[in-house]
Image: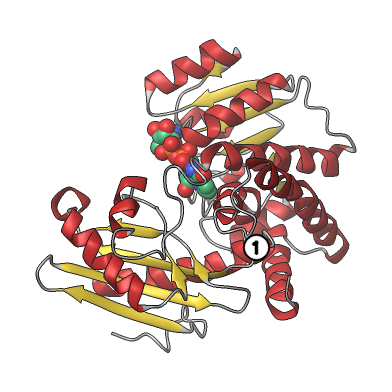
Amino acid sequence: MTVFNRTEFDNHENVVFCADKETGLKAIIAVHSTKLGPAVGGCRLWDYASDEDAVYDVLRLSKGMTYKNAVARLPFGGGKSVIIGNAKEIKSDALFKAFGRHLERLGGSYYSAEDVNITCDDVAVMNTETNYVLGLEGKSGNPSPFTALGTFLGIKAAYQHKHGHQDLAGVKVSVQGLGAVSYTLCKYLHEAGAELFVTDINEERVSRVVNDFNATAVNIDEIYDLDVDVYAPCALGATINDETIPRIKAGIIAGCANNQLAEPRHGEIIREKGILYAPDYVINAGGIINVYYETAPEGYSAEAATKHVEGIFDTLSEIFKRSEDEQKSTHIIADELAQEIIENGL
Ligand code: NAD
């Protein structure tokens, strides 16, 4: 297996392969950067097809966290961890305790949190062996409402940039995925007067949003073909791809899902098509911003977290302007902004 000469390897400060014989734990922790502060990023439990796939994922995701935390102007570096295995088979308190002991050994250079297949309860078990975890129940609490607020303000920033005002009354928005974040997002959009077109694989979630916010339900695949002003991807990654781009009529793509572009080149294709794209890791940073306030010297404050999340509007406005001035796609400008902040400090 190669690590140092992979394209995803970006001078990561530390990549630790962890195991525990008794519990069968196999994990990789990648600390990409601690330049701005301790590396922070969730732990993902996934049944990777190979160890190489796990290395690829952890290297890519940890670098992504460095950029996300920097652009959110948090005193955090970037890291991520992956536990290799089938969630249905390997989850146990003993396994998460063993993982917690590995976190403890890193001495606070990396703080873990929940991610795919890892719940707040699992993180609480890790916490019995280490303090280097964040996002615990009873501290900063559920991050989703904060992610929803940031996404809503990001949609407004995009609308302001494209149309010169941020009044969403009568604006048509399609929302793909109606989960923890986007239920609240739909609430904000409805209150702002937007007309909602929604879809989800879960019928109950669709009915709830249709009833609560007067939304129109559409079929799963129909979401890409709608004549709307804004498309908000809030479920899966890679929904902006060769197949969907020719179908998308929205002038703005702005939603909370992670990794929306199937490949970086799709960011350039949508820019050429005149679509304004709110880079995913910038618009969806509300949750990690809220988590940061768990560590704030003055203690957790929802008001302080909310104020910080509101800054997503200005950050995106700056990215949109630079993208236009420099004729570069917004995801490239976001990466450049992250690199500048990492280089020069917060
Ligand atoms: P969630 O699991 O609560 O909601 C996702 C929803 O998408 C579910 O209702 C699911 O049924 C639906 N879905 C799945 N496949 C679908 C499909 N093919 N078409 C339509 N709907 C589909 O997740 P969430 O916490 O609301 O997060 C949504 C997205 O935002 C994810 O990509 C997540 O990584 C990202 N995100 C979330 C947060 C947060 O604070 N929760 C923060 C940053 C990023």
Per the image, the residue denoted by label 1 is 74
- Residue 247 appears in view: no
Q: What residue is shown at x 60% (from left), y 12% (from top)?
A: 214
Q: Quadrant of residue 169?
A: top right
- Tell me: residue 220, above or below residue 239: above
Q: Is residue 230 left or right of residue 181?
A: right
Q: Quadrant of residue 261?
A: bottom right
Q: Is residue 313 left or right of residue 297?
A: right
Coordinates of residue 286 in the picture (x, y in percent): 61, 47
Scheme of colours in the image = secondary structure
Which quarter of the rendered picture does the C terminus lie within?
A: bottom right
Q: What residue is shown at x 84% (from left), y 39% (from top)?
A: 160
Residue at the front extreme, as displayed: 298
Which quarter of the rendered picture does the N terminus lie within?
A: bottom left
- Tell me: residue 127, above or below residue 173: below
Say few, some or many: other residues with alpha carbon within 10 Å of mark 1 (under 14 / 14 to 19 / 20 or more): some
Q: Which amino acid type is marked by label 1?
A: Leu
Residue at the bottom extreme, as displayed: 5
Q: What residue is shown at x 47% (from left), y 16% (from top)?
A: 208
Closer to the camera in the image, 88 or 140: 140
Q: Is residue 275 left or right of residue 113?
A: right
Mark 1: which secondary structure?
Answer: loop
Q: Quadrant of residue 127?
A: bottom left
